[in-house]
Amino acid sequence: MFCGSDEIHFIGVGGVSMKSLALLCKERGMDVSGSDKNDGETLAMLRENGVKAYCGHDPAFAAARRLVVYTAAIPRDDPELRAAREAKALCMERKAFLALVAASFDKTVAIAGSHGKTTTTAMLCAILRAEGRKFVGHIGGDCVGGECASTGGRELFVTEACEYNRTFLALRPDVAAILDVAFDHPDCYRDLGQMRDAFCGFARNIAPGGALIADAANAHMCPAGVKRVTFGYGNCDYCAEEVSYDGGRYSFTVAVKGKRTARCRLSVRGKYNIVNALAAIALAAEEGVSVERAAVALENFGGVKRRFERMGATAAGADVYTDYAHHPDEIAAAIDTARVMAKGMIIAVFEPHTFSRTKAMIEQFVDSFYWADEALILPTYAAREKASDGCSAYDLYMRVKARRADCMYMPDYGAARSYLSAHTRRGDMILLLGAGTVDAVAEGLIAE
């Protein structure tokens, strides 16, 4: 039990993190409920697993629960949150509850980074599962297949550590990873310097005698009394050598402290996944897993949904892929991955995520579409913001249009769907990019 309570209600239970926490609590024998503004597959799945999940608000029900957990995106005047506070129920933001859950395990491994943390966390879970280890994973996405599902127990908690709103500073991990640090979340951080300070704070939270696995650029964040392990290319503890590409996927040799140890062929696409895999292998090594066995496990890793995931093909034969990319670096990486695979045109369909991010990085967004043959811009997925917080999708479209003629603004998913149906053919690749609901463009577009 957490907080001595066996009744818990999640406001915003449809989010990937909240969903995972709700299921964990249910597995622990708690009476779990949750609400969300949107109904759909997630709430249906939760109900199938015994969670009282519903769409909308029920203030009276929430007020009767003993513990209420809410996300940072829930406003203070939310009807359920307000009713719970008035009823003197214990209310906790998600980051505080996540830290409480982590503290209930013997050991915590936390994986942070501006990019790649979801995939790396899932990779580590897949390795541990293949090894038959007892662990519980908290992943910010849904895995393809079941190779990274939790196996139970209270020995080890593996969690993605999110930098948004400095959430990860609530964690006190025994082992941590920092994959990379790039400017993001301008609604929370003034500049890259502030982000680096937050990541340094995360590293300082590692338990004495623990370990930090970091890319070479951020290894200096390792505090005294903590083991430092580096990964990447060049002079690193875990280095990728002899990189090769075949059929859309990369293979590489893992060199540990200069000694070539094992060959790894990734099933997931994208060159950026090489460093994610290196980080996962290094983390697994801290848990006593050999490099050779970790590499074999990663060869069978099917990836995370919405991370360069193939959705199908149109009637004309164009391949449709989806990717969670919502940062310029991620968009460029997705298009780069498509470039080495596509036989025809690459059409990037982007749904900006938050107005503040669009404003803060508008020039980088413009540059990120460079290798796409066409760019389609959809209205902003506002998430927690309003238009006055930054720049709109149309503002971005105008900037891209000024640079290149092959950019179009699509007022809705239907317009994008109609254009793509009429203007793509076999060999073309359609990329649906964004952290919102851009996948809906595929509805009615995919024939296979």
Image (spheres, rainbow, N blue to C red):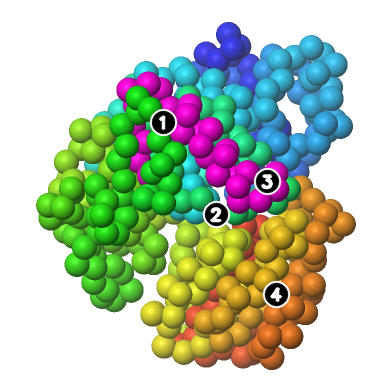
Q: Give the labeled residue for mark 3.
A: 189
Magenta includes 104?
no
Q: Are marks 2 and 4 in contact (CB under 8 Å)?
A: no
Circle 2: is it few (<14), some (14-19), or many (20+) Cα within 10 Å? some
Magenta includes 207?
yes
Q: State the image coordinates of residue 124 (x, y, percent, origin top left).
A: 33, 43
Secondary structure beneath disc 4?
strand
Q: Give the labeled residue for mark 1.
A: 223
Residue flagged by tag 3: what amino acid is it? Tyr
Sequence-first tag of 2 and 4: 2
At 52% from the left and 71% from the top, the residue drawn is 332
| Mark in front: 2 vs 1 | 1
Q: Are marks 2 and 3 in contact (CB under 8 Å)?
A: no
Q: Is residue 109 above or below residue 324?
A: above
Residue flagged by tag 2: what amino acid is it? Ala
Residue nearer the viewer, 220 or 79? 220
Q: Are marks 1 and 4 in contact (CB under 8 Å)?
A: no
Sequence-first tag of 3 and 4: 3
- Give the magenta-colored segment's residue range: 188-214
Real-space CA distance between mark 3 and mark 4, rounded to the nearest whole angstrom: 26 Å
Q: Give the labeled residue for mark 4.
A: 377
Circle 3: is it few (<14), some (14-19), or many (20+) Cα within 10 Å? some
Secondary structure beneath disc 2?
loop
Secondary structure beneath disc 3?
loop
Q: State the image coordinates of residue 98 (x, y, percent, origin top left).
A: 55, 27
